[in-house]
Image (tube, helix red, strand yellow):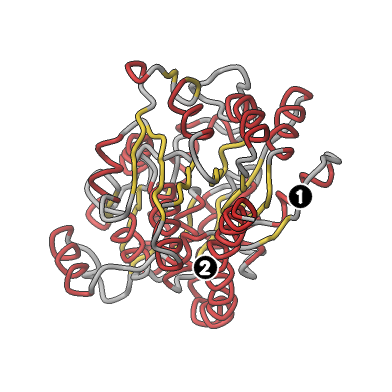
Amino acid sequence: MKTITVLGNNSGRNVGDNAILGNLLNDFTQEQSDLIFQIPTLNTRFIRSNFGNYPIHAMGLMPWNFAIKNFGWPLFRAMTKTDVVLITDNILFDRKFNNPLVNNLKSIAFFSSFCKKKGIPIVLYNASVGPIDHPEGVKAFQKVLDACRLIITRDIQTKKLIEDLQLRHTEIIVNADCALNTKPPSESHIQQIIEKEDLFKNPNGTIGLNVNAYIDTWSKKGKLKREDFCKIIAGTADCLIEQLDVDILFTITQIMDYQITEECVKHIRQKSRIRVVGNKNLTYQELAALLGKVEVHAGLRTHTLIFCAAMGTPMISINAYQKSLAFMETIGMREWNIGFDDISVEKLSGIILRCWENREQLRAKMNPIVDLEKKKARSSARLVLDVLNSIGENSEK
C-alpha cells in the first residue's frame, strides 16, 4: 500500500473543502487501488462518516492529540510517515503568520524541511496560493516549494504569483478545481429534498444568492459595513422578486455564514418568497444539485460558483476572493463579476437581471469550456500517481 497525506481545511464546516476532498479521493481511487489516505482534521468523526467508503485514516488535530490545530505531532507524523504529501485548496498564505489557529504556511514550511531530507515529495494539488505579502511569508513559501516535486494549481494567478516573487520552483501545471466533477445524487433523492424544503414551486423560476461572513475583511475599512451589505443583498432580492416575479434561494456552504444569511433575510420585505438551504443538513453533492436548478446565481463563496459551473447554471461572482475572479476568467465568465467598491442594489440587481436575460446563451458558451476543465481536473490524479510510482521504481533499482 502507498500512503498519500492530504492537507487542507478538512473539518467538515465548508462544503467547498468537502467537495475537494471527496472528488480527490474518487479521482485517485479510480486510477489506482493500492492507496491509503492520511487526512489531518479537527473533526475525525465527520471524515470517517462522510468518506469512510474510501481507504482513509483520519488524524486528529486537537490538543489531546498533542497539536495546536495544524502545529504539533499529528501534522509532523502525517508529513513524514507517508509516500507523498498533497497540499490542497487555498491554505498557503501569510495572513496572521504566527497564529497556528489561522495560518497553515508556517507549520507546513517547518515540516517541509523534514520531507525534503527524507525524500518525501510534496505536491501542490488543486491549489491556490496567497496572499503572500511579507518577507517571512515569502521565505516560508520558498521552503515548501523546495520540497515540491510538482505544482498543480487550479488558476493562472498562482503560477503568476510564484513567478512574480521570483521563487525557485519545479514544474507548474495549471489544471482545474476537482470540485467541478461533483456528481449530483439521483433525481429521486433531490426531489425528496425539494419537497421537504418547499423549493422550486414558482413557475417563473428561482434565482440563487450566497453571502459570507467576511464582509469586514473583503471591503475597504469603513467603506461597507456589515448591515449596509445585508441591506444591499435584501434590496436586491426584493428588486428581483418585484421585476421578475421569481423566488430567491440562499445557499449556505460554510457553517459560519448562517448568521449573516439570516441578517440578510431579516431585511427582505417579501420573506414568503425566500428559501434557505445549507450544509448543516445537506451534503456538497445535494447543494450542488440544488444550484443546478436555479436559473442564475450570484455568490461570494467560490465553490457556489464552481458548483453552478459543474451543473450548468450561469453565475455572477461577488468578488470576495481573488480565486473567484480567477475561476470566472477560466470558464469564460470574466465580465460577470461585481466588486465591493461597486456594489449597490442598482448595480447588483442590474447585473443579475442581465445574466437572467442572457442565461441560455451564457450556458451554451460556458458548458463546453467547463467540460474541458473537468477533464483537466480529472487528469491531476494521474500526474501525482506518476510521481508516486516513479519513487517506488527508483527505489527498487
Which of the two residues, 191 or 233, is positioned nearer the viewer here? 191
**Where is residue 158 drawn, in percent x and y?**
70, 49
Q: Residue furthest front?
A: 397
Q: Residues within 10 Å of mark 2 (few under 14, many from 20)?
A: many
Which of the two residues, 377 or 367, is positioned nearer the viewer here? 377
The mark closer to the camera, 1 or 2, is 1
**Where is residue 10 drawn, in percent x and y?**
40, 40
Q: Secondary structure at mark 1?
A: loop
Up-down relation of residue 116 to residue 208 (above or below): above
Marks 1 and 2, how far apart in space? 21 Å
Q: Residue at x 26, y 55 (%)?
A: 53
Proximity of marks 1 and 2: CB atoms separated by less than 8 Å: no
**Where is residue 127 drawn, in percent x and y?**
59, 49
Which of the two residues, 283 or 71, is positioned nearer the viewer here? 71
Report the amino acid beneath label 1.
Answer: Thr
Up-down relation of residue 37 to residue 240 (above or below): above
Q: Is residue 14 left or right of residue 276?
A: right
Report the amino acid beneath label 2.
Answer: Arg
Q: Secondary structure at mark 2?
A: helix
Which of the two residues, 11 or 259, is positioned nearer the viewer here? 11
**Where is residue 102 drawn, in percent x and y?**
52, 25
Up-down relation of residue 193 to residue 259 (above or below): below
Q: Residue at x 26, y 68 (%)?
A: 185
Q: Is residue 367 left or right of residue 208?
A: right
- The tag on residue 170 is 1
Q: Residues within 10 Å of mark 1 (few under 14, many from 20)?
A: some
Mark 2 = which residue?
378
Q: Is residue 191 left or right of residue 339?
A: left
Earlier-in-chain disc, 1 versus 2:
1
Q: Residue at x 36, y 62 (%)?
A: 288
| Quadrant housing the C terminus | bottom right
